[in-house]
Amino acid sequence: MFFKAFSCTGAAPLVFVGCASEVRQLKIIYFTYLKLEVNFMSINFGSLKKVAEGKTKIIYENPEDPKTAYMVFKDDITAGDGVKHDIIKGKALVDWKTNRDIFELLNRKGVRTHHISSPQEKVVLVKKLDRKINLEVVSRRIAAGSILKWGNIPEGTRFDPVITQFHYKDDPLHDPMLDDKYIDYIVKAKGGAEYAEMRRMNAEIFLHLEKAFAHFDIQLVDMKLEYGIIEGDVYLIDEITGGSFRLWPYAHKNPNLNQSNVLKELNPEGRLDKDTYRMGEKIDKVLTKFEEIAEVTAKFTDL
């Protein structure tokens, strides 16, 4: 892998050669030294049109390319369908790092994503959507969270293969789940190719991330992702950060994860995800957990 850097001072370009992690380190050193270059690349969002604003991000138009947009992370964190809300200073930067590393991994694996690049801190350049699909697609390997109550399933139950469910995005209705049999009917009888593709992609993405986190003795428990249509195809969109999944460290080395219930093999108390916020942890503790995730995903460059 190589990276060519051009100086705005007129000096000859530098070519960095090495593995992805080495290249990133060299880029950081190079652009930190050339502060004029960094300032030159800065984007003034005060002059850009705001397209949309959600709970954790703002979308701006890109006047230089109408087929792309800028996604900017905020320091906000929410839970309980938006009922619980706080500002965690520094969260936007941490989420941006995690999102960058995960989407770069998925792009390398050939997954169709909206992610193009991360041009500056807290900012992502993404492909512009033709249409957003108003669903959250949830894949689960280990039973945790709400499924324990509505599914009457013991915590730690292992699903093989992973199960994938669709939830209609509506906070006042608490994101109701769509019936699996009806989804099958849509796919088979109504030509619901988009549903079939989202189900396939979600399972594929889960396996990529499960394998990546396993390198660092962490189990991906479950995750929720979102999709949209770009030029007629289904694409992974939005973000993947500490609020997108549950992560439980292994309880010990070489756990036996091929059991019907693996709760004793994992350490739910050491969770690294947004459940810490849902359960009432202090804000600084929540940020620490998100920082731990970013430290892990920073190592995805070599996978």
Image (cartoon, rainbow, N blue to C red):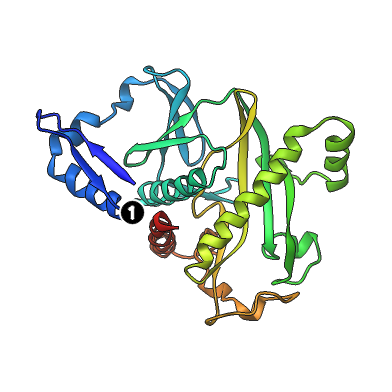
Residue appearing at x 38%, y 17% in the figure: 63
> Quarter of the image containing the C terminus?
bottom left
Residue appearing at x 68%, y 76% in the figure: 262
Residue nearest the observer in this picture, 60 or 12: 12
Q: In this figure, which residue is indicated by the disc labeled 1?
A: 19
Q: Position of residue 50 (x, y in %)?
A: 43, 24
Q: Position of residue 82 (x, y in %)?
A: 57, 45
The answer to whether residue 39 is left or right of residue 167 is left
Residue nearest the observer in this picture, 129 or 134: 129
Residue appearing at x 70%, y 65% in the figure: 143
Residue appearing at x 29%, y 52% in the figure: 18
The answer to whether residue 265 is left or right of residue 238 is right
Q: Is residue 213 above or below residue 242?
A: below
Q: Is residue 256 above or below residue 10?
A: below
Q: Which amino acid lies under the numbered mark 1 shown in the image of this protein?
A: Cys
Q: Quadrant of residue 184?
A: top right
Q: Is residue 68 above or below residue 94?
A: above
Q: How many marks?
A: 1
Helix, strand or loop under label 1: loop
